[in-house]
Amino acid sequence: MSGSGTGTPVSGWVGAILSGGSTDYALIRALLGVSIAEIPDATVILEPFLPSAEAVVKAGITNYAALTGDNLIHLRSGAAALCAALLCQEMERADAQSFTVGSYSERGSTVDWRGKASALLAQARADLAAITTRTWTRRTLVALAGPTRSGSNVPAEIEQWVERVVPRFVDWVEEGGEDDD
């Protein structure tokens, strides 16, 4: 393949998610199960691959620059898997082998690149979905405006119900609870 992919080289491009370092490209190649000879760095940074993958991730996760820890790991893994999925089409083109016997011709690939692309897209989806950016806040169960008859924030009907149930429950527990008979 030797960097002969179809696309526009992005000169001096450094991604915001995957920094463009050799370890990032090695991760993408590892996901595909190929070597640097099969997919050189120059192919990875072509426009339809890494820059496109990062653009999709940035559009979906707008606070990507603020992520740390496990969230950052999921972000980088998801972007790498998406880039690898995009590279599968190029790998299918480069890996295709053909033979001809008379008028019969067949073209095939040793790897199911479409299946691999589907698996990588599922992995990217899972990694990106694992990012937790949500903060949890407690919500008030019962919200009231103004005082109630009891002078607390709990309606009188609920207090009356609790006053009837709690003593019975306490008696039941003191008597030994549930019968096993």
Image: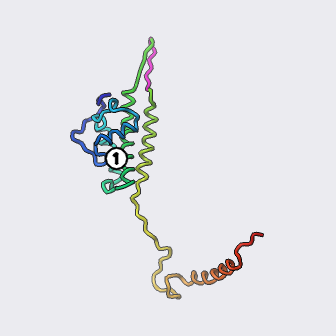
Q: Is residue 116 left or right of residue 179?
A: left
The picture quadrant where one finds residue 114 is: top left
- How many numbered callouts? 1
- Please, is residue 28 above or below residue 149 in the view? above
Residue at left 45%, top 84%? 146
Residue at left 50%, top 85%? 152
Q: Is residue 24 left or right of residue 161?
A: left
- Please, is residue 34 above or below residue 157 in the view? above
Q: Residues within 10 Å of mark 1 (few under 14, many from 20)?
A: few
Residue at left 37%, top 28%? 93
The picture quadrant where one finds residue 137 is: bottom left
Residue 181 image offset from top left, x and y in percent:
78, 70
Residue at the left extreme, as displayed: 12
Q: Examine the residues drawn in magenta and state their main secondary structure.
A: strand
Q: Look at mark 1 in the image and give the residue it sits on.
A: 56
Q: Secondary structure at mark 1?
A: helix
Q: Which residues are magenta?
A: 102-109
Residue 141 image offset from top left, x and y in percent:
50, 73
For the N terminus, the quadrant is: top left
Nearest the camera: 138 or 39? 39
Residue at the right extreme, as displayed: 181
Nearest the camera: 33 or 11? 33
- Please, is residue 46 above or below residue 135 in the view? above
Q: Is residue 55 left or right of residue 176?
A: left
Nearest the camera: 176 or 4? 176
Three-letter amino acid code of the residue under disc 1:
Val
Residue at left 40%, top 63%? 135
The picture quadrant where one finds residue 37 is: top left
Scheme of colours in the image: rainbow
Q: Is 160 a magenta residue?
A: no
Residue 168 image offset from top left, x and y in percent:
67, 81
